[in-house]
Image: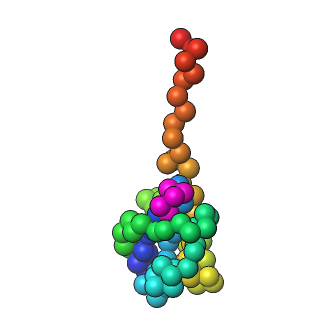
Amino acid sequence: MEFHVFQCKIDRDYFIVTDEKHVDSVLNRNVCVTQGDELIKVGVYGEMGIERVAFDEGLAKRSIDSQGFYRFEAKSFDPVAERPLAMP
């Protein structure tokens, strides 16, 4: 399977994964958490296996089969907290 991966433009920690069969319907629906958010294409990727992929491929496949897409949050994109000014 080839996964089509998109990132939400406003809530950039959220990613949408779909397949060729569902990509048009995903682009025409609001699948991001924030209403009116747009999708930015990240790329198209083949299956990578459990040790190399950024999301659970099995869960993604089941979700795509049932609803046409898989949405996940990549917490690693959260900004790193800075030290408060009062600390040495």
Q: Please say whether residue 4 is one of the residues in the magenta stretch.
A: no
Does residue 56 appear anywhere in the picture?
no
Location of residue 83 with respect to 73 vertically, above or below = above
Q: Nearer the viewer, residue 62 or 9?
A: 9
Segment colored magenta: 8-12
Location of residue 82 with respect to 19 vertically, above or below = above
**Residue drawn where x is 61% and y is 67% of the image:** 35
Res 73 quadrant in image? bottom right
Q: How is the image coloured?
A: rainbow
Residue 72: image location, x then y, percent: 57, 63
The total of numbered circles placed on residues is: 0
- Residue farthest to the front, as pictured: 36
Residue 63: image location, x then y, percent: 61, 77
Q: Is residue 44 left or right of residue 80?
A: left
Q: Nearer the viewer, residue 45 or 15?
A: 15
Location of residue 84 with respect to 73 vertically, above or below = above
- Residue farthest to the bottom, as pictured: 21
Does residue 52 appear anywhere in the picture?
yes
Q: Quadrant of the N terminus?
A: bottom left
Prevalent SS, magenta region: loop
Residue 29: image location, x then y, percent: 55, 79
Residue 48: image location, x then y, percent: 41, 67
Q: Nearer the viewer, residue 52 or 31?
A: 31
**Residue drawn where x is 51% and y is 36% of the image:** 80
**Residue drawn where x is 42% and y is 66% of the image:** 40
Q: Nearer the viewer, residue 19 or 53?
A: 19
**Residue drawn where x is 53% and y is 45% of the image:** 78
